[in-house]
Amino acid sequence: MQLRSTLLICFVWLLLLPATSTRAQEVSTDPPPAPVRLMAEWEESQALLVSWRNQHAILLREIVRHGSAECKVIIFADNPSAVSNYLSSGNVSLENVEILSPEYDSIWIRDYGPWTIYHNDVDSLMIADYIYNRPWRPNDDKIPAFIAQHLGLPIYEAIEPPYDWVHSGGNNLRDGMGTIFSSDLILEENPFKTEAEIDQIANLFFGVDRYVKLPALPYDVIHHLDMHMRFIDEETIIIGEYPEGVSDGPQIEANIEYLLNEVPTPFGNPYRILRIPMPPDAQGRYPDQNGDYRTYTNSLFVNGTVLVPTYDEQYDTTALRIYEEALPGYNIVGIDCNGIIPSLGAIHCITKLVGVNDPLWIAHARLQDQESTEDAYPLSAIIKHKSGIAEATLHYRTAGEADYTTVNMVLSDTSASVWTSSIPPFPENTVVEYYLAAEANSGKSQVRPIVAPEGYFRFKVDALQPAFGPESREICPGEAVAFENLTTGAYDSIRWYFPGGLPATSTVEMPTVIYPEGGSYAVELIAYKGSIADTLAQMSHVEVRQLQQPYLETFEDAFPATTWTVENPEGDLAAWERVDFDFCDPGAMRINNFLVDTRNTSDYLRANFDLSSLDNPTLRFDVAHAQKTTGIADGLRVNLIDCEGNKTTVYEAFGSDLATASPEISPFVPEGCDEWRTETVSLADFTGQAVTIEFENVGDYGNFIYLDLIEVLDLDPTSVSFAEAGVLKARIFPNPVVNQAQLSVRSPKAGVMTWSLTNQFGQRLRGGQMDLLAGGQQLQLPVEGLPAGTYNLQLSQGQSRATLRMTIAE
């Protein structure tokens, strides 16, 4: 926290300085011409940038050695001749190396270096930049403008209001399709901007249409995501894994749950998560024991090579194998990073890429394992070049074959540049390898993956089919679900993910998971066989009831969709719906038995309630209905459903017993309060339980049924009979409250009404007594000085009670 406070002071200091104090001239501080796209790291690059520091010369030399085999390496150095001699003495060819000597302050070029953006996805190469989050290194912040001038590229810098944006490259992971990930450090680094303003700047300068922000890890001091995760394609993320409960492991697992449950890939699929160990330091310590923050995700794509940090052979071999299996055909190179990792960075932190001037972009959702042995496997890709695409092809083979079969792809969506094709079905247990290729009208060609045909995407057919039970189900908060692994095919191990559950992950065959909070939760099961992992993700698999505390629902403004649900099993026009009235109470629920033949059908209105706070739980509601004729008997039932799914009918009335007005051959609309009746139902048999209250329309093609003022309350049936208790009805208007609130009360008799206003935590804020007359009246409710929020207003007159929700607007 002390580090963050120091940074904040420095950021404020930086914002007060004129831009010319640290910036090269002749740069644009306006956004680039829209639309723009931020390049992904696995795309084709023309240059690799590094800033030389002699204390890390051995590490930098190896990066230059392997990087220069893939593209030009541009080195920033204080003493170019000394660096040149050092590289040559280590047998590093200088043929593809350029050494420049601008002013700079540190080795951490990932954070302050230039960002490659393209106008119209592929048209014009441009450089984008922001304010480096280390203001005490002003020369570092000049490097983007320097390299833009050196390469003859336009640069757009988000450095002046309203676009002044403080950021760092290690906390900016991107997929090349408009999504970036950062830790929530980005919000702390920009304390004078709202999250929406930050998102807008990212959109204008980087073309970001989705900005995912994850909670920072407690033991990662710099809070940069590249220290524990990295994209390797549009839908695959490698994420570090600690032993259970160790160091940043719990927060990483929570972040994974969030990604799997809330964040789809740009193609709308769940992310494919690959795990890689986070190794201890040489003394066996992890970061929560003051150990070094060793990481294998701080790696770098350089066209066909991936540079991976290494530390200790006993852990390195596993990490390198994971990269090799995930990225077949790439040259996976391990480089010793023990010397730099105590400074909280590795390879990714000290390198930066510049994309090519003439990209041919192929974005593709790689095929996952397939189940069918009879149907073809369709695939698609976005393929674009500024000159247009002349031809796109799909190449596939089975594992072990030398030659690929080639088929043409078809441009199926011209506006989105989507090309499609398919791979024919194969027998079970077949491993299929494939790649995509394209040629532009200009003659430019490209393949995906970029190392094809030596490299490829692959999937298996019917070899491994994750499955689990039970089927999707609904439970109450605090209940457990016993899962069972039903995976078919041979596998080595499994891993479960239970967002919102306890435990959040498991590796056992039959885990039991408790869900403490209401909500809709996904379940994911990953089965591993060698280098193959197959995933089954079921969204909304576990529904945990969202329980409401007892309250009065008036339906006066809009249908409360967050608390009440409507089910219309037949999908016809007879469904519970909210309607407005100009008399009596202003809103109600209604179902249409008049115009729709509802015979032999049922329609439902439901809400979930927690009755644990009530000694004498009682349901009270108003109903209005007129029969169409005396021979037609529409009905209303009230059912209670417990946590085991058992349904009990606690109220039912049909025909004349339900009617509150004389029969009408025309559509019934209650014309006054005297055409409503209040029903009171004891729920004593369900005391202390969590229940679903279900209103069921049992149609007979008759007339409209109306419901209003549904209330769950505590009412002692022994002190006074329900009939004698009378009904206290009230509503607040306007609601939400802006400046003052009016309370409309209808009381069956004159007397004193006690009122109490509580906040969402049950704390009593205001209260008092009011004199009531029999009948209706309006009173002013004192709400001056209360902050915006939701409140409960509790009213009582004798044994008659009412509870209303009130919202005070900002």
Image: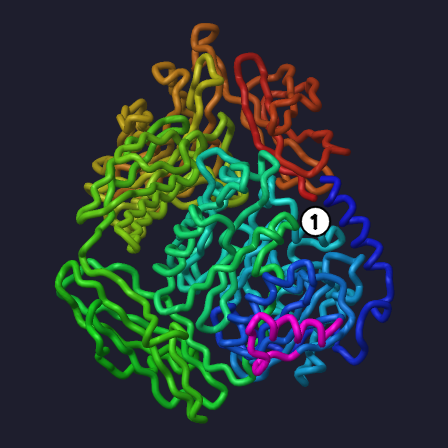
> Quick check: 695 above or below 45?
above
Q: Residue at x 61, y 23 (%)?
A: 762
| x then y, percent, for residue 54 | 69, 62
Is residue 140 rendered magenta in the image?
no
> Within the image, what quadrant is residue 496 found in?
top left
Residue 583 appearing in the image: no
Span of residues in magenta:
79-98
Q: Circle 1 sits in a helix, a strand or a loop, which is it?
A: helix
Horizontal side of 470 relative to 230 (left or right) equals: left
Tally the marks.
1
Amino acid at the residue labelled 1? Glu
In this picture, is 770 found above or below 341? above
Q: Quadrant of the N terminus?
A: top right
Give the residue drawn at x 38%, y 55%: 322
Percent position of residue 101, x then y: 74, 75
Query: In the image as oriented, which residue stretches furthest toward the bottom?
Result: 442
Residue 588 drawn at (x, y percent)? 46, 40
Viewer-nearest residue: 333 or 446? 333
